[in-house]
């Protein structure tokens, strides 16, 4: 029996502790939101994908699909964008492989390899070869797997990238282990451990292989001890897929020791973590093992339920149609490369035509914008000129009205002065006549009559002065509104409205006008009729609102 080892992806070197992971991811996400160009945004999205792929597959798939869609829509063809496209395809290949879509996974890996070879990106070629080796381990083709890992190692030894080289050593060790070549597996595991400044995840991966070999040689206690140390490390970095695999291995060791009570919790934890990362291959293996464990404990109902779930996952992974599609992809890969070369020539011509069309459309578009802007500018200038003219006319009308009002006031002053002179002459004449009377009784009566006449004149003058005081309080703008907007109103009606705008009631207006209340009401009724208002409408508000609307 062979243990399922941790098939370590190249992203292992980027794993940090979970508390720093969230902080870094949030910082990158904030930078993505404020990025000013596609090149900066895509680079940040790939960085974020490296951070999230171990914890949230769905989110990472969305991120890399967005990268591919942006590159496709914008038609980017430079070295930089092709490199980013290859990274995104490697991500999709990894997710498709984990979720049982073998044909899609292989297709994405081969596309990524083709791009990296075309642009001579040695780092990308090494990464993709490593992923292809991992793919063939999952499909139990260890010969092809070792072939790809050796090619990846040859490139990485030239690049002297020790972390990536350690990953390829470890994966080759896993391939030898699965191919039942423990001696070779130990050789490459020791090569991993010999690399200085090795990251914890790679140390853990090397330990996993050693633990599996200890299991094969019957040294179960040593294997369990190594696995439990690794569980603690992976919990700290929140590497769910690795936790799932290690728990499965520990459960298998306890089953070999007939300690079923200790085995079951580890299988439960393995299934819990595999569900989080949606790894169908792990889930199929774990449900099968838990079904067997339940049978050993004579829990047959639980065993049957887990076996049904195992069959569902197994059939989704290993159906014959998918196997045929994988073979077809391998056979057609070379043909696709030749076809792609021809398509690139055609795409180049098509891109030129599209560019010319786009330039024409942009020229027309910006020309239309300039024309609309010019027309809007002319319209605004005309509007400003019209407003300025109306303002000047209004000021002129105000000035004319002020002159007319002053002229009326001067005329009224002259009339009042004339009246005062007339009253004075009459009073002097009356005094002479009274002095000439010899009868004292007649003289007294004449004096009383003169006194009453003078009081009457004084009252009339006071009333006239009060009336003028109220009229002078009326806002000049209101008078202008009445004269300009309501020419149908006569002077008497305008005077009543002037009193109303001061807030005077009907009784107060009748006293100032020296007339009856019914007469004032009659005038207001005529005003409403001329303005087309009901008895409930406010006359003053109507006049003011009419002026606001016109303005």
Image (spheres, rainbow, N blue to C red):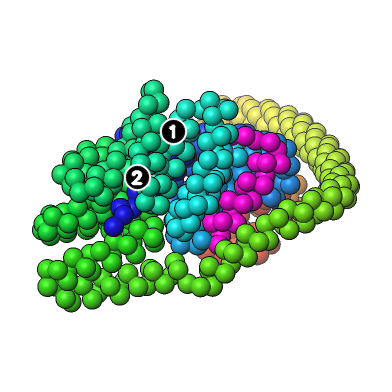
Q: Is residue 179 left or right of residue 250?
A: right
Q: Which contiguous range is marked in magenta?
A: 103-123
Image-quadrant location for residue 51: top left
Residue 282 appears in the figure: yes
Residue 67 appears in the figure: no
Image-quadrant location for residue 84: top right
Determine the CA span between mark 1 and mark 2.
18 Å
Q: Position of residue 10 (x, y in %)?
A: 47, 39
Image-quadrant location for residue 534: bottom right
Instruction: Using the image, tell me which numbered label, if any, was put on residue 166.
Output: 1
Task: Tell me what residue is drawn at x 53 percent, y 52 percent.
Answer: 144
Judge whether 263 appears above or below 231 on screen.
below
Magenta span dominant secondary structure: helix
Q: Is residue 55 left or right of residue 120?
A: left
> Element type at marker 1?
helix
Q: Where is residue 446 in the image (x, y as percent from the top left)?
A: 52, 36
Q: Position of residue 149 (x, y in %)?
A: 51, 43
Q: Does the magenta stretch include residue 66?
A: no
| Residue that badge 2 annotates | 182
Which class describes the residues within 10 Å of circle 2: few (<14), some (14-19), or many (20+)? many
């Amino acid at each position: 029996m062979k243990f399922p080892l941790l098939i370590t992806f190249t992203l292992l070197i980027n794993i940090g502790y979970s508390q720093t992971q969230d902080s870094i991811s949030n910082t990158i996400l904030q930078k993505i939101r404020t990025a000013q160009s596609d090149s900066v945004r895509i680079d940040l999205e790939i960085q974020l994908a490296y951070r999230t792929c171990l914890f949230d597959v769905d989110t990472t798939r969305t991120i890399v699909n967005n990268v591919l869609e942006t590159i496709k829509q914008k038609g980017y063809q430079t070295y930089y964008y092709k490199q980013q496209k290859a990274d995104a395809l490697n991500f999709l290949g990894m997710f498709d492989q984990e979720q049982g879509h073998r044909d899609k996974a292989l297709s994405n890996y081969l596309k990524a390899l083709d791009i990296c070879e075309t642009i001579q990106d040695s780092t990308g070629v090494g990464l993709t070869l490593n992923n292809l080796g991992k793919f063939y381990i999952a499909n139990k083709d260890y010969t092809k797997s070792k072939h790809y890992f050796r090619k990846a190692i040859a490139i990485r030894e030239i690049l002297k990238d020790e972390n990536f080289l350690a990953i390829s050593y470890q994966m080759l060790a896993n391939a030898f282990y699965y191919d039942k070549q423990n001696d070779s597996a130990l050789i490459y595991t020791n090569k991993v451990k010999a690399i200085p400044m090795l990251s914890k995840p790679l140390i853990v991966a090397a330990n996993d292989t050693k633990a599996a070999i200890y299991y094969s040689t019957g040294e179960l206690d040593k294997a369990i001890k190594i696995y439990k140390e690794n569980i603690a490390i992976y919990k700290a970095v929140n590497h769910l897929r690795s936790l799932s695999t290690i728990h499965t291995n520990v459960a298998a060791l306890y089953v070999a020791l007939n300690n079923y009570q200790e085995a079951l919790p580890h299988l439960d934890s393995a299934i819990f973590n595999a569900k989080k990362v949606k790894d169908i291959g792990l889930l199929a293996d774990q449900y099968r093992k838990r079904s067997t464990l339940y049978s050993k404990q004579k829990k047959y109902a639980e065993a049957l339920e887990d076996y049904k779930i195992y069959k569902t996952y197994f059939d989704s992974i290993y159906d014959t149609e998918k196997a045929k599609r994988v073979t077809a992809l391998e056979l057609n890969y070379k043909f696709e490369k030749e076809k792609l070369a021809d398509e690139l020539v055609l795409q180049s011509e098509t891109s030129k035509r599209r560019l010319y069309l786009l330039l024409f459309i942009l020229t027309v578009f910006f020309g239309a914008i300039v024309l609309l802007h010019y027309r809007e500018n002319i319209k605004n200038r005309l509007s400003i000129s019209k407003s300025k003219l109306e303002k000047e006319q209004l000021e002129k009308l105000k000035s004319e009205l002020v002159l007319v009002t002053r002229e009326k006031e001067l005329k009224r002053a002259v009339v009042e002065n004339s009246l005062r002179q007339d009253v004075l002459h009459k009073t002097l004449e009356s005094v002479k006549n009274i002095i000439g009377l010899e009868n004292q009784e007649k003289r007294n009566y004449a004096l009383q009559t003169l006194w009453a006449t003078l009081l009457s004149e004084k009252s009339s003058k006071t009333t006239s002065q009060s009336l003028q005081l109220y009229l002078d309080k009326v806002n000049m703008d209101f008078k202008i509104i009445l004269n300009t907007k309501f020419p149908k109103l006569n002077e008497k009606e305008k005077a009543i409205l002037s009193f109303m705008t001061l807030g005077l009631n009907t009784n107060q207006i009748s006293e100032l006008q020296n007339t009856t209340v019914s007469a004032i009401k009659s005038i207001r009724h005529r005003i409403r009729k001329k303005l087309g208002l009901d008895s409930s409408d406010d006359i003053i508000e109507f006049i003011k609102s009419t002026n606001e609307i016109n303005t």
